[in-house]
Amino acid sequence: MSRTKSRALLAVTALAAAAAMAPTANAASFNLEGWATQCGGTTGGGSASRVTVTTASQFASAAQSSSASVILVSGTISLSSMTKVASNKTILGVGSGSGFTGQGLNVANASNVIIRNLNFSNWGDDAINVQYSTRVWIDHNSLRNGYDGAIDIKRASDCVTVSWNKISSHDKTMLLGHSDDNGGEDRGKLRVSYHHNWFDGTNQRHPRVRFGNPVHVYNNYYGGVTSYGVASTQEAGVLVEGNYFENTRDPFHRGEGDSDPANLVARNNHFVSSGSGDQGGSVKSIPYSYALDSASGVKSIVQGGAGVGRISVP
C-alpha cells in the first residue's frame, strides 16, 4: 500500500473512532431540563445536611422544617393526610422500594423543591399537589392506583418540570390549572415541562391544561391511553413535540368538558395504532435549551429510564 493511501486509511479510521466516542444526538439525559431551570433554577436542598426518615411523623417534621435539607425516605411510609412540603427541600426515595401510600405530598406556598425516586400508591387525594409554588422538579417517581390526581399543578404555580415518571392503573393523571374561573391568578403562570414520562394504560389528563403558555409536552410515551392524551383549554398554549403515541385513539385535542378550546401545536410525533390528534393556533416560544430524542425511539428510551430505581441515590 502506498504512503498516501496508508495516510488516508488512518484518517478515515480516526474519524470513525471519533464518531464512535461522540455522544449521540438522541442520548437521553437524566439531568434537569425544562421550565424548572428557569425563574432562578431549582436546586432543592442542595448540599444541606441529609436526614433519613422511616415514619410519617419523622417525614412531616423534616418536610415542614424551615431549613434547607435533603430528606431520604427509607421504606414505605403510610400517610394519613396530605403532608406539606416547605421550601428548599430535596426528597429522595432510597432504592426502588421506598415511598408513600394512603395520602400524598402538598407543595403549597413553597419554592425550590425536588421530589425524586419515590413510589406513590393508593392515595386518597392527590399523590403530588403543587399550588402557589415555583421552581419544582418532580422526577423518576412511580405512581399507581390512586383516587384523584397523580400530579396536579395549579393556583399560579410556575416554572415546574415533570420528568421520567411512570404512571399506571390510574384515571386522572396530570391536571394543570384547576378551574376555568382562575385566570386572574393563572395567566402568565402555569409554565410546565412534561418530558420522558410513561403513561402506561392510564385514562385522561396527560396533561389537561388551562392558561399556561408555553407548556411543553415532549418525548413522552403514551401506551394504551384509554380516553385522551393532551388537552389544551382556556387560553393555554401547548407544544406537543416528539412524543410516541401507541394504541391511543385521541392523542391530543383542544377544549375539554365545559372548558373552551385553546392553542395546541404538534410536531414530530410518532403514532402507532393511534389517532392523528387535533391542533391549531400558536404557542409562545420555548425559552430554554433541551435535548429532543427522535420520536420513533422514545418508547424504548422511556421504558428503559422512567420510574423508580433508575437513578442513584447515595
Image (cartoon, rainbow, N blue to C red):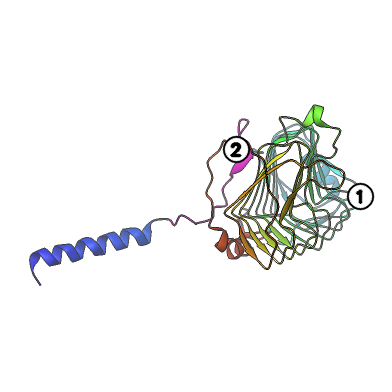
Q: Secondary structure at mark 1?
A: loop
Q: Which residues are magenta?
A: 23-41
Name the amino acid type tagged 2.
Answer: Thr
Q: For residue 31: magenta?
A: yes
Location of residue 70 with respect to 242 vertically, above or below: above
Quadrant, the N terminus = bottom left
Q: Nearer the viewer, mark 2 or mark 1?
A: 2
Give the alpha-carbon distance from disc 2 to disc 1, as whole Å.
Answer: 33 Å
Q: What is the magenta segment's predominant secondary structure?
A: loop
Q: Is residue 43 visible?
A: no
- Identify which residue, 175 or 254, lies in the foreground: 254
Q: Are marks 2 and 1 in contact (CB under 8 Å)?
A: no
**At 21% from the left edge and 60% from the top edge, which residue is drawn?**
11
Q: Residues within 10 Å of mark 1 (few under 14, many from 20)?
A: few
Q: Position of residue 200 (x, y in %)?
A: 73, 63
- Mark 1 highlights which residue? 80
Q: Residues within 10 Å of mark 2 (few under 14, many from 20)?
A: some
| Numbered disc total | 2
Q: For residue 25: magenta?
A: yes
In this rendering, would 35 be left or right of 207? left
Q: Which residue lies most toward the bottom here?
A: 1
Q: Position of residue 74 (x, y in %)?
A: 74, 55
Name the amino acid type tagged 1.
Answer: Ser
Q: Is residue 196 visible?
A: yes
**At 54% from the left edge and 45% from the top edge, which residue is drawn?**
290
Q: Which mark is residue 37?
A: 2
Using the rendered view, name the quadrant where residue 82 is placed. Answer: top right
Using the rendered view, name the quadrant where residue 114 is placed. Answer: top right
Q: Which residue lies most toward the top here?
A: 184
Q: Position of residue 120 (x, y in %)?
A: 79, 56
In this rendering, would 18 be left or right of 262? left
